[in-house]
Image (cartoon, rainbow, N blue to C red):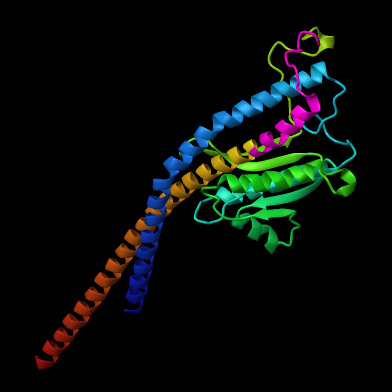
Amino acid sequence: MSSQLALKSRIASTRSLEKIFNAQEMIASSHVAKARDVAMNAKPYSDAIFEAVQALVMHTNIAHADVDHPIVKKRGENNPRVAVLAMTSDRGMAGPFTSSIIRETESLLSRLDADGKQPELYVYGRRGVNFYKYRNRDIAGTWEGDSDHPGVEVAEAISKALLEAYMKPAADGGVSELYIVFTEFINMVVQKVRVLRMLPVEVIQPEGIDDKENGGMEADTAALYAFEPSLDQVLDAVLPKYVQSRIHECLLTSAASETASRQNAMHTATDNARNLVDALTRKLNASRQASITQELTEIIGSADALNTEEE
């Protein structure tokens, strides 16, 4: 009897969890389409800015080799400090979303340490902040709130803090590189963790365009831009817009990935809870049937004993 009470209690608690998981799945499914559309709509703008910056940097490297600007090259090769921003989630029930980000961040930090760098960690998302604070890790900056639907304000705050750290001289604790670890939304099922080196900008040479020494593009044929009032002022104006747009895009695609991951995780949890209820119900029925059989056996045995005594 006690085992039946325990099984009934487990069935009741599992059904309650099933309702919670199902509700979370329905909420996530109602939000994921909007989060996906927002991320996809922001991507063309961010890609356009990145392509413009790449073209600008490529032109600067070819036509203005003497330019020393933070967006083009590292400010001080002897500065080992680099900034790493990890984009995690504020809430749980999202499957391996945050754990994958943390695992990739730890791998990146290890690689940077092996290269002689001194990484400074920045964390977005309450889950990641709690993870590193619990382990007494030094965190240069944190941001929390609305990881599943981030706004422009948080993108501005993060870009301002990272850009300030990047623009500081090495003597004042500045960094020479900026990395972002985030989850890219591929589709409703696949979300991929990526590491992006945001600054300095890495130039991707188009096919067929090599350097001048290899018979590629000549410096005079690459002079397609005229800068007004000056090249440095144009680069100074482009740099903050580029950083904010890239961070905003990463936040939006990370939010879409979090919502999709939560929907998938809650769907799996709901199915597992239902399967567990079915298994526990079968055990309860088997225990109840065994109890009934035992009672019938005892009754029949008692009746046979009474009949034997009367004879």
Q: Is residue 4 magenta?
A: no
Closer-to-camera residue (94/256): 256
In this view, the residue farthest toward the front is: 229
The quarter of the picture where residue 247 lies is top right
Closer-to-camera residue (109/253): 253
Residue 64 percent across, percent down from the top left: 83, 19
Residue 58 seen anywhere in this rendered image of the structure: yes
Instruction: Give the tally of numbered discs.
Output: 0
Left or right relative to 96: residue 244: right
Q: Is residue 243 magenta?
A: yes
Residue 161 percent across, percent down from the top left: 72, 48
Q: At 52% across and 49% down in the image, what residue appears? A: 148
Q: Quarter holding the N terminus?
A: bottom left
Q: At 34% across and 61% down in the image, what residue appears? A: 277
Q: Is residue 107 above or below residue 214?
A: below
Left or right relative to 91: residue 57: right
Q: Is residue 220 above or below residue 260?
A: above
Residue 154 percent across, percent down from the top left: 61, 48
Q: Quarter holding the C terminus?
A: bottom left
In this view, the residue farthest toward the left is: 311
Closer-to-camera residue (156/219): 156
Residue 289 percent across, percent down from the top left: 24, 70
Residue 107 seen anywhere in this rendered image of the structure: no
Left or right relative to 84: residue 183: left
Q: Write the start and end of the magenta stretch as one range.
A: 219-244
Q: At 85% across and 25% down in the image, what residue appears? A: 67
Q: At 90% across and 47% down in the image, what residue appears? A: 171
Closer-to-camera residue (266/29): 29
